[in-house]
Amino acid sequence: MSAPECGDEISQRLVAAAYETIAARYVVERHQIGAALLDADGAVHFGLHLDAMVGRAAVCAEAGALSAARLATSAPLVAVAAVRYPKPTETAPARIVPPCGLCRELLLDYAPGLAVVVTGTDGAGRLVSLAGLLPHKYVGTKWGAPAPALAEHTRTAL
Ligand SMILES: [Zn+2]
């Protein structure tokens, strides 16, 4: 098995890293998804999905990667990819998965200019604006309004 193919260098790097993460740590019904999050300094931070007996207690791989990134650096975050590893009973290959709704909210709270790898109509991974996947994001009064503009380094990658 191998990482899904992508149409650009950043996507391929992140998808390969997310694939390698979950391929190394996959456990049936415990860890199915790995994530890789690129910061503006070029470092990649990793996350592992944590399933739970109570489904809503589960933690997504993207949330793990965000936590790892914030532990390591204050650098702006550029792009994220997540890859789902198939169960032993499945014949489908590993695939890129877009962030769930909760992760869209969470990631945008910390990285309004973030790009995310999704599968394009040609079947290859490609970068899109995460903000574009969550129009009308919830904005509370706790932190004030975030700046939703794409960071320059992200804009050039799209
Ligand atoms: Zn999620």
Image (cartoon, rainbow, N blue to C red):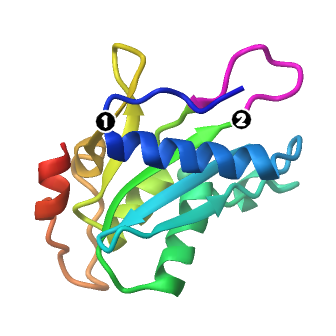
Q: Nearer the viewer, residue 154 or 31?
A: 154
Q: Nearer the viewer, residue 5 or 48?
A: 5
Would you say residue 21 sits in the magenta stretch? no
Q: Residue at x 34, y 15 (%)?
A: 121
Instruction: Please say if the residues under marks 1 and 2 sit with CB atoms less than 8 Å apart.
Output: no
Task: Decide if residue 12 is in sight here.
Answer: yes
Residue that carries the numbered disc 2 in the rendered image: 85
Query: Can you tell me whether the CB of the residue at mark 1 lies under 8 Å from the nearest atom of ligand 1?
Result: no
Judged left or right of residue 113, residue 99 is right
Check the image and report above or below for 37 versus 4.
Answer: below
Secondary structure type for disc 2: loop
Q: Residue at x 24, y 51 (%)?
A: 131
Residue that carries the numbered disc 1 in the rendered image: 8
Residue 25 image position (x, y, % from top left):
80, 52
Judged left or right of residue 86, residue 7 is left
Q: Residue at x 40, y 62 (%)?
A: 38
Residue 112 image position (x, y, % from top left):
25, 65
Specify the segment rendered in magenta. Answer: 85-95
Residue 4's quadrant in the figure?
A: top right
* Mark 1 residue type: Asp
